[in-house]
Each structure stands twice: as structure tokens, then as C-alpha cells.
Image: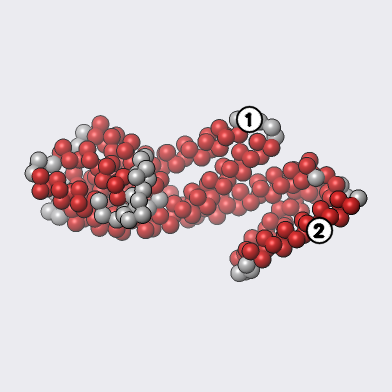
Amino acid sequence: MIRSDLVKIFFRSLLISSSLNYRRMQNLGFAYALLPLVKHGDGNPKTTGAFLLRHLQLFNTHPYLSASILGSVARVEDSGELDDRGGVAVQIKNAMMGPYAALGDAFFWGGMRPCAAIAAVAVALGGYSWAPLLFLALYTPFHLWIRGRGFFEGYRLGPEGFRFVQGLNLPGLNPLVRWFSVACLSVLVAWWMKTAMPAPWSVAPDPLIAPVILAIVLMFVWAIKRGISRVLLLYTMAAVFFLVSICYGAE
């Protein structure tokens, strides 16, 4: 396959969720991305029909990691060395889509996106109108790099394309990103409460406010890990802040 066709498949992969449906999820986007492969086939309508049929089956994974699967499948489908190209391609899809969905959801939705959002909110509270641009600058380049590199590494490695995602060690990076987010959030909350609600914190020296808020956040993390209900913690904090507002509102 020529490189221009690979580039076409990659750019089409960015649209994989645009035709998301409840029956077969991302299958239309997956098949659409692979359409440039059709012109490299033997021209037999039956072969083309079988190709489209197997890639219109159920497919659902994290959109950012789907490009890696597409790259591996494209390599297998384009290879003339495999006797059962269709069977191997389907096996790759079925084997990778579940683990990639779990990895991507935990890292990007649960780690990277909240971290970038916290940074953008901090800038927005400072009165800067370019806060949304900061969010995009922090979040977008990384996931585009993973999509692009994942696709071309997947095509280069074929059935072994999972090694690129494996090498990223997303499960190992995710706790670091989340803890960094918690630390930034505690500092942000402390700053906001000091500036917007100075009365309750006027009794504490400024250097102690951020550590106190961080300790409270970490206490909640510990409570959640111990199995305490998040709903109970939410209503408990709501009650505490309600009482604080009454006490200091009366003054």
C-alpha cells in the first residue's frame, strides 16, 4: 500500500465515532476508514463484499486507541502472505477492542481530561479568556500523537501492533496523572476559597491553607478506597459547607 492511502486511512480514523450507533457501535466508522484498501483488492465483488461484511460487525473501543487497531488490521488485510487474512483481522479486532476501551477510558477520560480541565479552570478563575485554548493545548497534542503513532506502528508491526500501546504503560501513568490532578485541585480550591470566601479562612495563616485542603482531598480519596459511599461523602460535605455558611453568614 502506498503511503498516501495510509494517510487517508489515518485521517478517516479520526471520524470513527461520528457514526456511532447503538446496534454495532463504531462499526460504520471502522469500515469507512478502511475503504481505501478496497482499491488494492482483486476487484472481485464477492471479495469486496466479504471485506465490508466482516468490518461492519460490532466494534467498540476507545476512539484514541482505535487507530492502533486500524493500523494492525490494515496491515493484515493488505498482506499477501496470510492465507486467512479476514479471520486474522477479525481476531485482532475482537482481542484488542475490549482492553483498549478499558485503558483509554481510565487514562484519557479519568486522568488526562480532568487534569487539563483543572489547569484551564485555574486560569479562567484568574480572569484570562484564553483558558479554553489552554485546555486544548494541554489535551489535544498528546492524544493526536498517540493516534498517529499508534496507527503507523500498528501498520508496521501488524498483529504485533499491541506492543506500541503496551509500551506506553498507561496503567502506570494513570495514577501519577490522577495524583497530580488532586494536588492541583487542592491548591486551586484553597486559592479560590481564600479569595472568594476569606472569612472562614482568616483564622489560618496563608501557607497552611493549601496543605489543609490537600489533606481533606486525600482523606476523601482514602475514604473512597475504603469503600465508603461517594453519595454519603457528598452529602456529608454539603451539610458541612451549609453549616459553615450559616455560622459565618450570621456574623
Q: Secondary structure at mark 2?
A: helix
Residue at screen point 29% across, 58% down: 94
Q: Which residue is mark 1?
A: 129
* Badge 1: residue crowd in 10 Å (few <14, some 14–19, many ≥20): few
Name the colouring of the figure. Answer: secondary structure
Q: Quadrant of residue 5?
A: top left
Q: Is residue 79 left or right of residue 172?
A: left
Which amino acid does the dot numbered 2 rest on? Leu
Q: Quadrant of the N terminus?
A: top left
User: Looking at the image, how many numbered discs can be counted on the residues?
Assistant: 2
Between 34 and 163, the residue placed more toward the observer is: 34
Q: Is residue 87 left or right of residue 242?
A: left
Between 88 and 21, the residue placed more toward the observer is: 21
Q: Is residue 156 left or right of residue 132?
A: left
Q: Quadrant of residue 48?
A: top left
Q: Which residue is mark 2?
A: 243
Q: Position of residue 157 (x, y in %)?
A: 28, 47
Q: Is residue 108 left or right of residue 13?
A: right
